[in-house]
Amino acid sequence: MTYIIIAITVLVSISAFNNQSLMHRFQYNPYQVYHQKQYYRIFSHALIHADWNHLIFNMLTLFFFGAYVESAFKSLYGMVGILYFILLYVSAILISSLRTLKKHQNDSWYNAVGASGAVSAVLFSFILFQPLGKIFIFFIPIGIPAIVFGVAYLVYSAYMAKQNVDNIGHDAHFWGAVYGFIFPLFFDFRLIIYFLSEIFPFIN
């Protein structure tokens, strides 16, 4: 399912690169969602991206971590785990968009695109399952423990969301990440015990 999501997102994004009408129709505009009731935009914006770099970065992240998270759900719950993975991804698009909706509901000029909120959710589900797994960042040859990366990611996203100094959806990153960590616990809260048992020796 990870690869199907990637394929669909890539195809729609490439189409939008060459079709501004599609881009405008699918982009996330909180004003139009709130005032014009165009609720579909909450989900459609995850299918399009600003440019090739944006698309490639998100889809590479989903490629590396999505397959593992999907496999983890399947190993825990059988084939129904695939449905849980789909639910994680789709619901994360919604959850990660809510803060932006509240923040920019009266800003007709504000637009956002990209699957970053959902991808962040998948990444943080991975961190719950593998807190000491290694995450490699571009140009850094040494893997960073997932839990360390996760904490730094949340702190940075929360800080930048308050600054409003760039065009990156830091609110979506933050809330998508938080939701992705919590989501698997809805089905088995014992996963937090495993998570803590993994990180306590690392911290000590």
Image (spheres, helix red, strand yellow):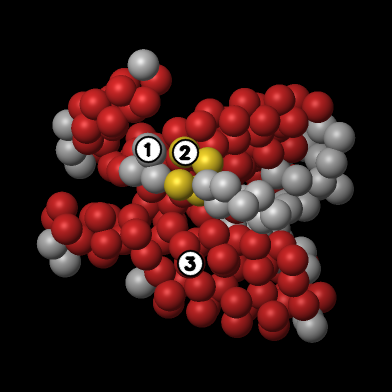
Q: N-terminal of the two: label 3 or label 1?
A: 3
Image quarter where the C terminus lies is top left
Q: Which mark is residue 63?
A: 3
Alpha carbon distance from label 3 to label 2: 19 Å
Q: x, y percentage for residue 114?
A: 65, 59
SS at mark 2?
strand
Label 3, residues with CA under 10 Å away: few <14, some 14-19, many ≥20: some
Amino acid on which disc 3 is placed: Phe
Asked if disc 2 and disc 1 are in contact, CB closer than 8 Å, the reply is: yes
Which residue is disc 2 drawn over? Answer: 145
Which residue is disc 1 drawn over? Answer: 131
Q: In front: mark 3 or mark 2? A: 2
Which residue in the rendered view is the most extreme toward the top? Answer: 204
Amino acid on which disc 1 is placed: Pro
Q: N-terminal of the two: label 2 or label 1?
A: 1
Q: Answer above or below: position of 40 versus 144.
A: below
Amino acid on which disc 2 is placed: Pro
The residue under the point 37% across, 37% down is: 131
The residue under the point 61% across, 42% down is: 172
Asked if disc 3 and disc 1 are in contact, CB closer than 8 Å, the reply is: no
Is 72 in front, or is 82?
A: 72
Image quarter where the N terminus lies is bottom left
Q: Is residue 71 left or right of residue 159?
A: left
Q: x, y percentage for residue 165?
A: 86, 35
SS at mark 3?
helix
Label 2, residues with CA under 10 Å away: few <14, some 14-19, many ≥20: some
Q: Answer above or below: position of 39 versus 176.
A: below
